[in-house]
Image (spheres, helix red, strand yellow):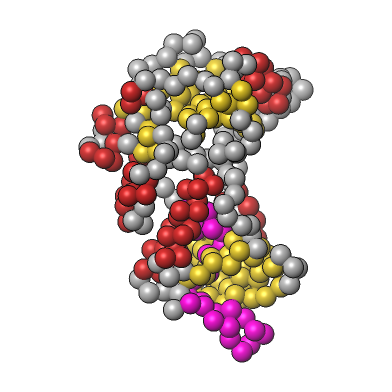
Amino acid sequence: MPPHHGPAHDAVLCDVAVIGGGPAGAAAAALLAERGYRCLILERGYFPRYHIGESLIPHTYGTLSRLGLLPALRSSNYPVKHSVRFVSPDGKASQPFYFSETLEGERARTWQVLRSTFDTLCLDRARAMGAEIHFGAAADRVLFEDERAVGVRVVSEHAEAYDVRAQIVIDASGRAALLGRQLDLREPVAGLEKSSVWGYYRGARRREGIDAGETTIFSFRGGTGSGTSPCRTIWSAWVWSALRIGFSAPPPTSKGPSPTTSATTLRCRTSSAEPAGKDPSAESAGWRTATAGRWATAG
């Protein structure tokens, strides 16, 4: 049953309001709608849209299976990912870590997806399961009464505000962390203060066979310096027909080069491949819940 408008303040009524239409929000809404709950996804943008975070991990298999997405992924052109390879700071590459060493059957593989199409696939599945989607709907804040979440204040793309009343609110807003900011829940994680840059390149060579879709991770020392610990990382993975290369390091300081400078160096060293632009076609869920408060975070 879709959400409907109620008489009080012309609010939209539903059982579950989901903030964000990415994979976490779409999955939550799809599975709850399948059980008969009236779910409304509030998505501030429009799909398809670009997003980073294309490399899935094998343990998403169970969720993808529950969502009924495996047939579409099997028939897609996404590179199949069987392994991860690590390169140490001294330049020595390890043998690939094949997921089949610890997992059996089809669960031992996953995909390097194109998020613009993969996220749309997830959202379409949520809609097919009965969830309703409001695009251009930016969640301004979660509404509370007596410390219980009762809905969401939404601002449309035309700057019109309206309320969504819900029994449960799920914040799947990703890095926006709407509830985390509103309730001051965010906490820094020591050692994970990173800045990242990335780009896409065409013309690079793939490995052969089942190694063609691997993710390769290079770590090296230097920069803002915590002893000799590797504190900088380059990762690469095939996305569609382009090679994505990213660089992650501690935030820049006066003692070390900035990620932008390092990205320039990286670009020079991959000059045999051509930049493919922002979108190569031209992000399992973690949960935090407060049961009594009728809210949860996902993503």
Depth order, front residue of 266/144: 266
Which residue occupies 54% across, 21% down?
A: 203
Q: Position of residue 219 (x, y in %)?
A: 52, 20
Which residue occupies 59% across, 15% down?
A: 272
The answer to whether one can see residue 229 in this image is no
Q: Position of residue 130 (x, y in %)?
A: 43, 70
Rendered position, 221 above or below 23: above
Depth order, front residue of 174/23: 23
Quarter the N terminus occupies: bottom left
The answer to whether one can see residue 14 in this image is yes
Q: Position of residue 185 (x, y in %)?
A: 59, 54
Q: Position of residue 99 (x, y in %)?
A: 31, 32
* Quadrant housing residue 33: bottom left
Q: Which residue of the protein is positioned furthest toward the left in this rendering?
A: 104
- Image side of residue 62 versus residue 229, left or right: left
Which residue occupies 56% across, 59% down?
A: 20
Which residue occupies 29% across, 36% down?
A: 108
Q: Please count the marks in the image.
A: 0
Say whether residue 167 is magenta. Answer: no
Rendered position, 127 above or below 22: below
- Image side of residue 126 versus residue 173, left or right: left
* Quadrant housing residue 152: bottom right
Rendered position, 32 above or below 255: below
Q: Which residues are magenta?
A: 2-26
- Image side of residue 148 versus residue 125, left or right: right
